[in-house]
Amino acid sequence: MNQWTELADRVLAGMELTNEEALSILDCPDEDVLLLMHAAFRIRKQYYGKKVKLNMIINAKSGLCPENCGYCSQSSISKAPIESYRMVDKDTLLAGAKRAYDMNIGTYCIVASGRGPSNREVGQVVEAVKEIKDTYGMKICACLGLLKPEQAEKLKEAGVDRYNHNINTSQRNHENITTSHTYDDRVATVEHAKAAGMSPCSGVIVGMKETKQDVVDMALSLKVLDADSIPVNFLHAIDGTPLENVRDLNPLYCLKVLALFRFINPTKEIRISGGREVNLRSLQPLGLFAANSIFVGDYLTTAGQEETEDERMLIDLGFEIESVEEMKASMAAGAE
């Protein structure tokens, strides 16, 4: 029995990793990564079997953001040539939902740029979500920025199941990434979503010059926040942003990060998110031995892998895609 199997056994027995053990995962020798991923899969399999949850994004509002996040092509300091537009209309949101439903994607994610939504924008989302729920009954995740408690309540009442607001990086590293809002602002929004009864979704972006200790701290912070879903993004350095030349990641390290998040948050949905194509590259399939969820299609301002390639990857791995109907049944069971 190797050290990773022993760690997995401890996690499955309900024990938590020490800080040194967590760091050892990120320091795993490259030649032992397959052993590490096998151990992570034992934890993943215990809670999720061979199921994979699919998520699709619609970029409901692009650019026009006053924040100064260094990684983002939509920020006020970005010079990236992106398309900018205000909140799309209800028909566009409904068309995106239909496309996701027709592709058997369980969660439809409505994402809008900006510091936080206006009440008018919340109203637009609410109107669309009610019709999407009536028509398709699918799971809806909203990601609209910093949220006020009363806005969170309106979204919940309309049928939004999950609210995403990432912590992005560690508390210690936050001011190196943005100064237009605080780490505590982000945590408060996650708490508002939880208080309103929405499932909290919060994740990270790895590769923004953080230390390995920062990565461990991110995973531990999300454990404390009790995020149900954890998107793990890997920095896709975009020309025209302050982090345009930061390309510190490699595929094996990305796998170690995914394993770490599984070991620290064993029961949670771990989603391989933005940047997987350019950072995991040919090792993308191995990531799913730790993660149990992926985004399908394009991201906000960057292209994703072809949907057919994602489906082929999952089939080749022998994984089972969680269908819309299974997602509905799971939501119904949770409401009982």
Image (spheres, rainbow, N blue to C red):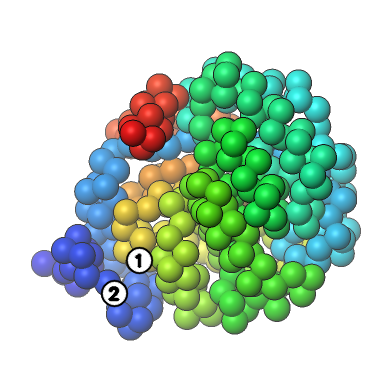
Q: Is residue 213 above or below residue 268?
A: below
Residue at x-position 68% and y-position 43%: 111
**Which labelled disc corresponds to residue 214?**
none
Say which of 48 and 278 sits in front.
48
Quadrant in the picture for residue 89: top right
Q: Is residue 102 above or below residue 216?
A: above
Density class for disc 2 (Cα within 10 Å; few <14, some 14-19, many ≥20) is some
**Given the image, on which type of amino acid does mark 1 rest?**
Ile
Looking at the picture, how far across and down is residue 197, in whole percent? Answer: 50, 47
113 vs 99, left or right, is: right
Q: Quadrant of the C terminus?
A: top left
Does dot 1 land on a helix, a strand or a loop?
A: helix
Looking at the picture, how far across and down is residue 172, in whole percent? Answer: 59, 81
Looking at the picture, how far across and down is residue 178, in whole percent? Answer: 74, 71
Say which of 36 and 321 sits in front.
321
Residue identified by numbered label 2: 17
Does dot 2 land on a helix, a strand or a loop?
A: loop
77 vs 94, left or right, is: right
Looking at the picture, how far across and down is residue 17, in whole percent? Answer: 29, 74
- Residue 96 in sight from this viewpoint: no
**Given the image, on which type of amino acid does mark 2 rest?**
Leu
Say which of 322 and 275 sits in front.
322
Say which of 269 and 254 sits in front.
269
Q: Quadrant of the N terminus?
A: bottom left
Residue at x-position 69% and y-position 47%: 151
Q: Earlier in the sequence, mark 1 or mark 2?
A: 2
Residue at x-position 32% and y-position 63%: 263
Residue at x-position 57% and y-position 24%: 133
**Which labelled disc corresponds to residue 264?**
1
- Residue 202 in sight from this viewpoint: yes
The reply to whether discs 1 and 2 touch (Cβ–Cβ < 8 Å) is yes
